Amino acid sequence: MTSKQDSRDDVVSSYREAPTRTVAAGGAEFAYRELGAKSGVPVVFLTHLAAVLDNWDPRVVDGIAAHHRVIAFDNRGVGASTGTTPKSIEAMAADAVTFVRALGLTKVDLFGFSMGGMIAQVIVRTEPDLVRKLIIAGTGPAGGEGIKNVTRISNLDTVRALLTLQDPKQFLFFTRTPNGKRAGKEFLTRLKERKTNRDKAISPRAYVAQLKAIHRWGLAEPSDLSAVRQPVLVANGDHDRMVPTKNSHDLARRLPHGELVIYPDAGHGGIFQFHAQFVEKALEFLAR
């Protein structure tokens, strides 16, 4: 692992090869990887429940990094980042802002998937001047329908996965149709492409803290999204079991500059199943 003071003269174009760096901020050491362009507004990736740096689809990362500086990081207390994992989305959002500012960034685009999309919604409301554009996928608003059930669904599918010797994401992220099953296997294979300097798995304590944060988000009072002035791209599959797809429609409807894309025969991980189409759409959205 290298520090952020290390040389960055060489442009890294592949997430598989991106070194893991750390930066000290807010009493923690945040682990992160960056790649892509050295100029322009960077795209900061905000990740999902239980995820570490190695859970990002390299096709999505590399696709966006072909035209933008991309920065992905481990939340506080997760993976190689130190500290205690917060039990609220709001505290996670504050950590993300702390991390971004520690890198000296004053304007970013945010790409949040699932729990990361919840974190992004808080950041854009609490630190509006920091954010240029938002991409949020597989996510929902505070108090959104079915979000309080994430813990139950996650536990159920973890048991299903153990009983069938599969990865829980095969059930949580993808449909049980032939297309969904195939896409899930391909996605899980891509996640293993990085062979060296892989991240540490999330600890059980951090995972439980994240589940509590999402549960609280699901029970929270709806937020006023009409104040969000940034363009927002909302994406999902049409059969999301974790964060029901109707939440994506709700978000796009309530955001003044919201744009919605729904992928067919796809679940929570629709952006990974349709990674080529999603990257093309994301790049077009960011370039406007």
Image (tube, rainbow, N blue to C red):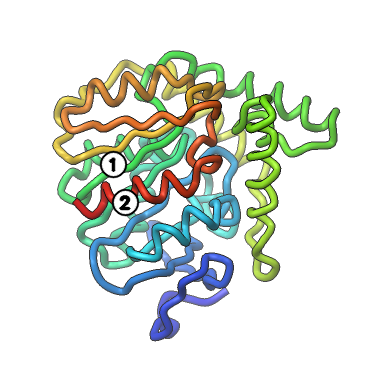
The residue that disc 2 covers is 97
Residue 29 seen by the camera: no
Tally the marks: 2
In this view, 58 is above or below 18: above
Separation of disc 1 and disc 2 at Cα?
7 Å
Residue 88 seen by the camera: yes
Q: In this orientation, which residue lies closer to the viewer: 244 or 286?
A: 286
> What is the crowding at mark 2: few (fewer than 14 residues within 10 Å), some, or many (at least 20)?
some
In this view, 213 is above or below 167: above
- Where is the N terminus found, in terms of image quarters? bottom right
In x, y percent, where is residue 221? 32, 16
Q: What residue do we see at 50% from left, 17% from top?
A: 148
In this view, 144 is above or below 6: above
> What is the crowding at mark 1: few (fewer than 14 residues within 10 Å), some, or many (at least 20)?
many
Instruction: Kindly state the secondary structure of the residue where label 2 is placed.
Output: helix
In x, y percent, where is residue 256? 16, 28
Q: What residue do we see at 66% from left, 57% from top?
A: 200
Residue 166 quadrant: top right
Instruction: Kindly state the secondary structure of the residue where label 1 is placed.
Output: helix
Q: Which three-letter amino acid code belongs to the residue tagged 2? A: Val
In the image: residue 128, left or right of residue 57: left
Q: What residue do we see at 26% from left, 63% from top?
A: 105
In the image: residue 104, left or right of residue 117: left
N-terminal-most mark, 1 or 2: 2
Residue 143 quadrant: top left
Image marks 1 and 2: residues in contact by CB distance under 8 Å: yes
In x, y percent, where is residue 287? 23, 55
In this view, 246 is above or below 280: above
Q: What residue do we see at 58% from left, 67% from top?
A: 16
In the image: residue 80, left or right of residue 110: right
The residue that disc 1 covers is 123
Q: Which three-letter amino acid code belongs to the residue tagged 1? A: Ile
